Amino acid sequence: MNKIKETLFWKVITNKYFIVCFVFFLIILVLDENNLLVIRSLKHDVAELDYTIDTLKQGIYQDSLQAERLMYNLDTIERYGRENYYMKKKNEDVFIVVNEDKD
């Protein structure tokens, strides 16, 4: 038992400054409210939100281009109304074809 107590490892482990620092880092890294796991998950959430922001900005850009086309081109307005709202002219019939996937 005396050999163990005389080793450098044992002296470092039983040092009061080492013990205080170890407990401090244990509290900060694992037990604290803002520990490493919370920080990691928050960084993941921020990355997801950044991706969502980029996707929404791209959608806004596409919608603004579509709105710009609809403002100045009558053919585009007619095509948009026919495709999205199934509008038709007086003397015409519209047939809606639905593709059903077979599982």
Image (tube, rainbow, N blue to C red):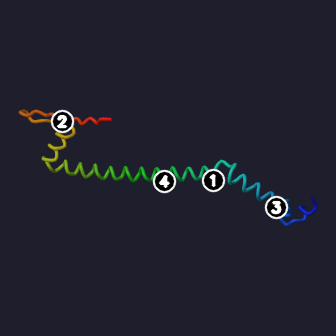
Residue 47, which numbered label? 4
User: Mark 2 or mark 3: which comes first in sequence?
Assistant: 3
Q: What secondary structure is found at the residue carrying circle 2? A: loop
Distance from Cα at disc 2 to Cα at disc 4: 40 Å
Check whether the beta carbons of the residues at disc 4 and disc 3 lie within 8 A of each other: no
Q: Which mark is residue 17?
A: 3
Point out the tag, 1 or 2, that comes first from the N-terminus.
1
Say which label, 4 or 1, has the lower sequence index.
1
Q: Is residue 59 left or right of residue 41?
A: left
Judge by depth and name the residue closer to the eye, 66 or 18: 18
Q: Amino acid at mark 2?
A: Tyr
Q: Are marks 2 and 4 in contact (CB under 8 Å)?
A: no
Q: What type is the residue that disc 1 sits on?
A: Leu
Residue 18 relative to residue 58: left or right: right
Q: Are marks 1 and 2 in contact (CB under 8 Å)?
A: no
Task: Verify CB contact (< 8 Å) between mark 4 and mark 1.
Answer: no
Residue under numbered circle 1: 36
Name the residue type under label 4: Ala
Q: Amino acid at mark 3?
A: Tyr
Cα separation, mark 4 vs mark 3, equals 39 Å
Q: Give the labeled residue for mark 2.
A: 86
Residue ID at (24%, 49%): 66
| Quarter occupied by residue 29 | bottom right
Q: Residue furthest right?
A: 2
Q: Is residue 93 left or right of residue 103?
A: left
Badge 4 element: helix
Q: Position of residue 68 (x, y in %)?
A: 22, 51
